[in-house]
Amino acid sequence: MDQYLARTQELLKKFPSWRLTNVDREENWWADSLSKLASSDLPVNLDLIYVDILMALAIDELSVNQIQNSLDWRKPLLDYIIDNKLPEGKNEARSLIFKKKDYCVIGSPLYQRALSEPLIRCLTSEEAHQVMVEVHIGICGEHLRGKNLALKIIRQGVYWPII
């Protein structure tokens, strides 16, 4: 997004003047219709709609930054609950002691205690990804996104910190 912002600011310098105004949806029915059409699953007759296909990127370089987290987020909790082992850092240890009351181990999985739900199984990052894919593509229901997806996953009885 930063690259698109920089490109936009670069292009705006070429105009002698410009202004940005908010247009209500009722007054901008053409764009509103196109946005609804783009997000629908209905077949579209493209002969009736002007479509401009961009053959090049608007920005020169596309970079993708991905955070790799090889450490299982559950490991410090499991170490403390099972072996009473605290991390080296004072703040991390204090945080872990405070969090311990919300978690328990039954067998080998870690569970989170919820206020209004039964115990919720804590997942690894890989398990969480698999659950999101299955719920999102419809194995467990309809196609969802955002908060609805997260709520449906929690109702399935699973949890990870960045849900």
Image (cartoon, rainbow, N blue to C red):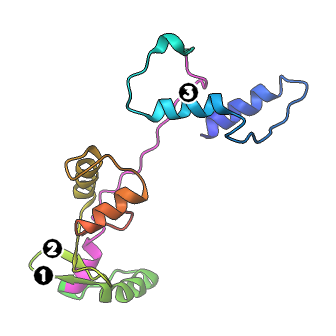
* In the image: residue 70, left or right of residue 145: left
Distance Cα–Cα, label 3 vs label 1: 49 Å
Q: Secondary structure at mark 2?
A: loop
Q: Which mark is residue 106?
A: 1
Q: Main secondary structure of the magenta part?
A: loop
Disc 1 marks a residue whose amino acid type is: Ile
Q: Secondary structure at mark 3?
A: loop
Disc 2 marks a residue whose amino acid type is: Pro
Specify the segment rendered in magenta: 53-81
Q: Residue at x 63, y 34 (%)?
A: 4
Disc 3 marks a residue whose amino acid type is: Glu
Instruction: Name the outermost residue toward the right.
Output: 16
* In the image: residue 77, left or right of residue 27: left
Q: Residues within 10 Å of mark 1 (few under 14, many from 20)?
A: few
Distance Cα–Cα, label 2 vs label 1: 6 Å
Confirm or deny contact between disc 2 and disc 1 (CB under 8 A): yes
Residue nearer the viewer, 40 or 133: 40
Quadrant containing the C terminus in the rendered view: bottom left
Residue 55 inside the magenta-drawn segment = yes
- 97, above or below 40, in the image: below
Q: Which residue is mark 3?
A: 61
Q: Residue at x 52, y 30 (%)?
A: 62
Q: Which residue is mark 2?
A: 109
Q: Position of residue 130 (x, y in %)?
A: 23, 51
